[in-house]
Image (cartoon, grey):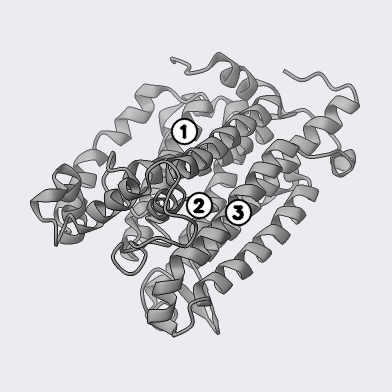
Amino acid sequence: MGVLNPGLHRVARTQMRPFSGAGATTQSPDFTLLAVSLALTLFGLVMVASSSAPAAYATYQHPEQLFVKQLIAAIVGLVLLFLFSRLDYRKLFAYDGILMIVAISVTFLTLIPALAPGGLWLRLGGFSFQPTEFAKFALLIFLAASLVRKSESGEIRDFMHGIVPFFVLFGVLAVLAIAQPDFAMVIEYGALLAFMLIIGGARLIHLAAPTLPCIPVFFALIMTSEYRRDRLLTFLNPFSDPDGRGYHLIQSLTALGSGGLLGRGLGASREKWLYLPSAYNDFILSVVGEELGLIGLLLILSLFIIFAWRGLQIALDAPDRFGFFLAAGITFSITFQAAINFGVTTGVLPVTGLTLPLVSYGGTSLIISLAMIGILLNISRSTQAARAKGARLL
């Protein structure tokens, strides 16, 4: 198998070392990662407050309504970040199957109209929840734990026992997501699965065998849906229908272009006044560019690059393979979504529906992202504890 990075491959192959996590909570987490995560979350709250006010007023007659919801989600997420940063991540290893079953069951509930009128959000009482985000979290833990087991037994190199079960699971999750419909999450599931299997040591030919037949199915799903087909055609030529299919992208590019180097000023966006659809979620970067200019965009980009760098370093330094797979998967999941959102906003990629992690409006996404970052911080704590005990790290 061709290995993208020998260092990643070497860490992924190391044996699962017994290590007591008792001292992990006394160690300091990766301060740079924590600072970047908090900065992105705070920046997101500021931009949601700015970009969501017109839409919130039009819908609820209260301009602060969406911001308040996002603020509550941020508080819940930060509490989970703290808890997961203190909880030994190895405890998750034994619950990967249970989490996956719960995630599939909860996602299935969105097919019941009484519980999920819109199909995507599960509503219980006064709360709404996006099960596909939780399913992504459960999938990540399940993949990390399964790869440890399969690499120890050698099954990861076997097609039927090492690869097929993962693709069956992906098929179940994809069908449930498409039924909602949440096509963007199918992209996330697929990208995460491919990434984890590659770093886990799977043979590339084994990955190609089930992937190639999926390509025409993927294309058929796009072309048989007017909504998804329009998104693709818009990407190819947005100006062919500037008042219809191309409206989203043209307004996004207009916002970015009008911001210049320094922007119009915080809160001074014109596009957010219901000209730019999804200004506070899918296209929040457009508002950032309009209000804070190229400087603001470069700041956000720099923060995500630093996040990716620190996450990768935590993965490479992890004291065991479960920590390696978890850290690498979390880092990939967040940075992949950010990269896609940057590409969509600037017209480099077709509209996917993927929001900007930690920044865009979306309570479930924010909560899950912060919880995953908490796990990442705990892995960094455990690495420090292992070093303090003199453990040999690769």
Query: Which kind of residue does numbered mark 1 sit on?
Result: Phe
Earlier sequence position, callout 3 versus callout 1: 3
In whole angstroms, how far apart are the C-alphas of marks 3 and 2?
Answer: 20 Å
> Callout 2: helix, strand or loop?
helix
Tell me the amino acid under the disc marked 3. Answer: Thr
Work out whether residue 116 can be spotted. yes
Q: Is residue 47 above or below residue 27?
A: below
Q: Position of residue 384 (x, y in %)?
A: 82, 31
Q: Report whether 370 appears left or right of 268.
A: right
In the structure shown, which secondary structural element does the residue marked by tag 1 occupy?
helix
Q: Residue 207: x and y, percent?
A: 37, 30
Residue closer to the observer: 284 or 370: 284
**Which residue in the structure is indicated by mark 2?**
136
Query: Which sits earlier in the primary sequence, circle 3 or circle 2?
Result: 3
Residue for badge 1: 195
Left or right position of 224 against 364: left
